[in-house]
């Protein structure tokens, strides 16, 4: 099995043709204010989704325009997969999921309780799933409670109880983070330089004996903790009622963050992003997807400078105090000196512009809406 290590993934296209893009802050549903912004469609799009992908893959693409985009994820994975992108139909990202010709599965209930003596007020909780849902709810308690369903199976033949027991959720305290993650045969977990990395190696010669798994997780977390929640395939990430910072990532599925206070990022590759703030945010925000929409709901006192980049999409808002700002001049290091580049996307300002709110996407629109309830 050939290996391809992907830490910085860049697709470069040759061509200099610039095609004007019509980006709007426009009337949509109950929205009642409009301005028009013309930007260029020839731009660089960096998708920093906090994942480092290290895996075997097939990649096919059919893009119609000139641009670069980079992936930067927060898990190291070594996974045989199939990955392709067609600009008109979007991403197709396939990891191992259950098929009709697979062997019978074993299902087990999950019930893990992590007492308050195992972490402190400064601890960040990091939940990393691979296949399946992650739903996190903040509450007033002082324990972390992980429940849900584990399903394990082989591609062919029966799986034994002993083999099923080798796939489980492990927890480990590392530096200032409490990690909950999937342990499995052929999975090597490394804690290094302040982060946890997965390296998953499957032997193609023993493919029929491979143990596959799917975890659907529901987690209760003290709502004053910082949180990082992620899954990769076959599931959604849903977070609610957290008060001290949320980072939510997915690859092949949606991300929903509801009724939160504080710093929030929400990113995916193939899916929609939806974020509801209980209070207007007071720190900078980033939201990214490649193939999907992004919807942000904030109280009416939102104060932000908004940057928006998309190839096939528009920006909509129903906030009324909006104005267009001049294009920005970006300073970048180039060898021993610097180069300066004018950002082709004109930012807009909502309210007094106290924070930065960035949107980056390829095939979708973004919506900034006033929260009504």
Image (tube, rainbow, N blue to C red):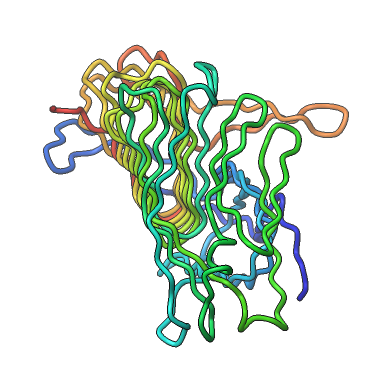
Above/below status of 21 relative to 24 = below
Quadrant assignment for the C terminus:
top left
Above/below status of 226 relative to 100 = above
Quadrant assignment for the N terminus:
bottom right
- On the rendered structure, is 224 left or right of 62? left
Above/below status of 217 relative to 165 = above
For the residue pair 273 and 235, the one nearer the viewer reads as 235
Name, please, the residue furthest toward the right.
Answer: 336
Above/below status of 59 relative to 362 = below
Residue beneath the point at 52% across and 46% down: 128
For the residue pair 22 and 209, the one nearer the viewer reads as 209
Residue 29 appears at what percent x and percent y? 14, 43
Residue beneath the point at 67% across and 37% down: 195
Residue 317 appears at what percent x and percent y? 25, 34
Residue 120 appears at what percent x and percent y? 52, 18
For the residue pair 206 and 347, the one nearer the viewer reads as 206
- On the rendered structure, is 148 left or right of 124? left
Residue 285, located in which quarter of the rendered image? top left
Residue 24 seen in render: no
Residue 184 seen in render: yes
Residue beneath the point at 47% across and 83% down: 102
Residue 362 appears at what percent x and percent y? 46, 53
How many marks do you count on the picture?
Answer: 0
- On the rendered structure, is 267 left or right of 337? left
- On the rendered structure, is 36 left or right of 285? left
For the residue pair 55 and 159, the one nearer the viewer reads as 159
């Amino acid at each position: 099995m050939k290996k391809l290590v992907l830490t910085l993934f860049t697709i470069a296209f040759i061509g200099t043709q610039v095609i004007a893009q019509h980006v709007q802050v426009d009337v949509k549903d109950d929205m009642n204010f409009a301005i028009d912004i013309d930007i260029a469609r020839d731009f660089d799009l960096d998708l920093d989704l906090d994942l480092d992908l290290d895996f075997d893959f097939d990649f096919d693409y059919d893009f119609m325009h000139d641009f670069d985009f980079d992936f930067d994820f927060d898990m190291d994975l070594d996974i045989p997969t199939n990955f392709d992108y067609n600009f008109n139909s979007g991403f197709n990202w396939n990891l191992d999921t259950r098929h009709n010709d697979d062997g019978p599965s074993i299902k087990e209930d999950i019930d893990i309780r992590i007492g308050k003596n195992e972490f402190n007020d400064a601890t960040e909780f990091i939940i990393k799933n691979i296949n399946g849902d992650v739903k996190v709810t903040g509450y007033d308690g002082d324990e972390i409670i992980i429940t849900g369903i584990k399903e394990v199976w082989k591609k062919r033949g029966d799986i034994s109880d002993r083999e099923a027991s080798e796939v489980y959720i492990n927890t480990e305290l590392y530096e200032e983070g409490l990690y909950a993650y999937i342990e499995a045969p052929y999975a090597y977990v490394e804690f290094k330089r302040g982060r946890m990395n997965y390296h998953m190696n499957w032997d193609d010669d023993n493919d029929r004996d491979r143990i596959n798994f799917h975890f659907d997780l529901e987690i209760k977390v003290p709502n004053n903790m910082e949180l990082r929640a992620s899954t990769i395939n076959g599931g959604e990430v849903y977070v609610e009622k957290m008060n001290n910072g949320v980072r939510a990532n997915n690859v092949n599925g949606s991300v929903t963050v509801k009724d939160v206070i504080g710093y929030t990022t929400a990113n995916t590759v193939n899916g929609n992003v939806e974020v509801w703030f209980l209070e207007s945010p007071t720190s900078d925000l980033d939201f990214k997807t490649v193939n999907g929409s992004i919807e942000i709901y904030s109280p009416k006192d939102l104060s932000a400078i908004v940057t928006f980049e998309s190839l096939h999409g528009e920006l909509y808002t129903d906030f009324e105090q909006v104005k267009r700002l001049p294009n920005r001049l970006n300073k970048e290091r180039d060898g021993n000196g610097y180069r300066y580049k004018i950002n082709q996307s004109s930012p807009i300002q909502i309210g007094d512009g106290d924070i930065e709110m960035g949107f980056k996407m390829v095939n979708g629109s973004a919506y900034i809406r006033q929260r009504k309830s």
